[in-house]
Image (cartoon, coloured by chain):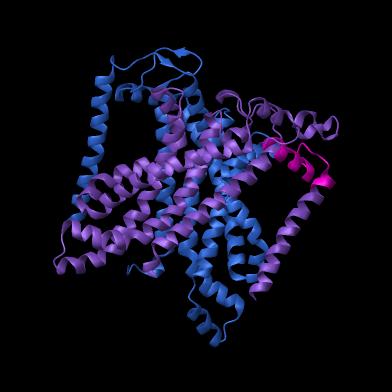
Chain colours: A purple, B blue
Amino acid sequence: MKRRRSLLWVLSLVALIATYALVARAVSRPDVLPPAQDLAGAFAALVGRGQAPAAGGEHQHHHHSSDQVDTLLQEGVTLQASLAVSTARVLFGLVVGVPLGILLGLLLGWSRRADDYLHPIYVLARSVPPLAFITYIMLWLGHSEAHRLIPIVYAVAVTAVIPTYHGVRDIAGKYVVAARSLGARGRLLLAKVVLPAAAPAVLGGLRYSVAIAWMTAVGAEMLMAENGMGNLLVGGGMWSSRLQTRSDPAVIIVGVLALAAAGWAMDAATRLVTARLTRWAR
Amino acid sequence: MTGAVKIRRAVIGLVTVAALYAFASEIGRGRLPDRVWLGAHYVENVQLLPTWRSLAEEGTFLIESGILPSSVAVSTRRVMLGLLLGSVAGILLGLLTGWAAHVESLADPWVTFFRYTPALALLPLYVVWFGYGEASKVLLIATNVAMITLLGAQHGVRGVPRVYLDAASSLGAKRWLRFRKIVLPAAFPSIFASVRIAAGLAWVTIVVAELIDARMPSLGYLLALSGAYPRVPSMLIGIATVGALVLAFDLLALLVHARATRWMGRAG
């Protein structure tokens, strides 16, 4: 059974790639569906090996479509550097945002009084998409790294609150009653009962935080950053003229594939860490 | 009794925030710089913290001129269409892949790929394929929504206790009946939770899509325009409007959920 499943999996993957290659060949519009060699060419050009795909020998068709590669190469953009910058932003967002979210979640989940006063404010704040106020941050802090990082931190923190809140209130709640009746108080209760009981929920929510961090980072970079994967996808240019130049789908597809790979890797790492840390819970 | 205390405390919390803002904006008036460096040039007459009064005036203007209502209508329409298309496709696919194992292994590589792709990254590709305008935006939202609801539906179907299915088949229920009477109702909460998450993310998607392709009239356009001048009261009202819409969608979703699962009882 297991072998049959993995066989189907591989078959489907091969079919996916073959279908794409055949359709791209049949459509024969490299400006819409770039053939496989264009993707390879764009990849090679973006990692700094070989020339832009247009130099491959094809003719006028490519003229437009390699504009994006040319612009990116002129600006010295490479795939690996863009991925590194985006990853750094995502990690920063996680490292700062997750503890903030956990702290707020602990506060709201722990104290009924704090929950009553602060929860409505939190719900209002949570509803505002962080990318909507990116320009407002720029007015305050100028054109800097801050307005790319703050939305990521905000999005991550707001996401990390929910699983912590539920972990503390719903899961730890019944243990708290028992521990209280045995005389546990204050710090002992928090460290020995609440945190361990809530930990699986908190760590489970980490996967959402990772996904949200990537999405916000790419969005922020698409809107206003001169580096990172979002910038690579929209092919540079200033904030007001983004996506105005003719895009090269080969570059975008290579970028999307790289993002999917990075997202997968980070999710796998998160699951691994989570499984390690909550081994005692199973 | 406790309900009244809760409401009183909620009101106190919100009023405190509003009062703190009023205080800060009064202090900031005349003290905060009104000349701001915007990357390439300075802009004058910027109210970094507009007072409640100027926010109210700007809000009246935006509503009376019809800018805000039409922006809200356009953006909401896109989100609703994308949400509808995406959740129908996603839920059907999720139920199918969750229920039929061989379909799942066939679909898995595709699902794995899209699942780890930040939906916004597809925006430039959709612009190449479908051009600017409605199609690329609605489809972008639909893709995003479909992915989330697919996972939700799959999760829901897989979480159905084996015992239920075995009990039903031992009583003679056929496959379709088991699916309709056991799997669907049991998967509903998980599907619904994913639709709720998807609705929130649909708004994130549309705001970014509209900011990048800023055209009349849409909420993204309002944000882009007020950012270009910059006109802070308009900007803040735009941000607050997006937030209010997200909140409204969320509340609506909760209401529908409570209605639809009334049969389950609220034992906890």
- Tell me: residue B251, above or below residue A277: above
Mark count: 0
What percent of the width, then of the height, locates residue B161? 48, 75
Image point (26%, 25%), residue name? B24
Residues rendered magenta in the picture: A24-47
Residue B228 picture location, percent across and down: 50, 21
Q: Is residue B9 left or right of residue A275?
A: left
Give the image quarter of residue A204: bottom left
The quadrant the N terminus of chain B occupies is bottom left
Residue B241 x, y percent position in the rendering: 42, 35
Residue B215 drawn in magenta:
no
Quick check: A75 above or below A32?
above
| In the foreground, A102 or B159 | A102
Residue occupying the point 70% across, 67% down: A8
For image coordinates 73% across by 63% down, the residue present is: A11
Assign the magenta stretch its main secondary structure: helix
Question: Which residue sits at x=74%, y=58%?
Answer: A14
Q: Residue A126 in the image: x percent, y percent?
A: 38, 43
Q: Is residue A109 visible?
A: yes
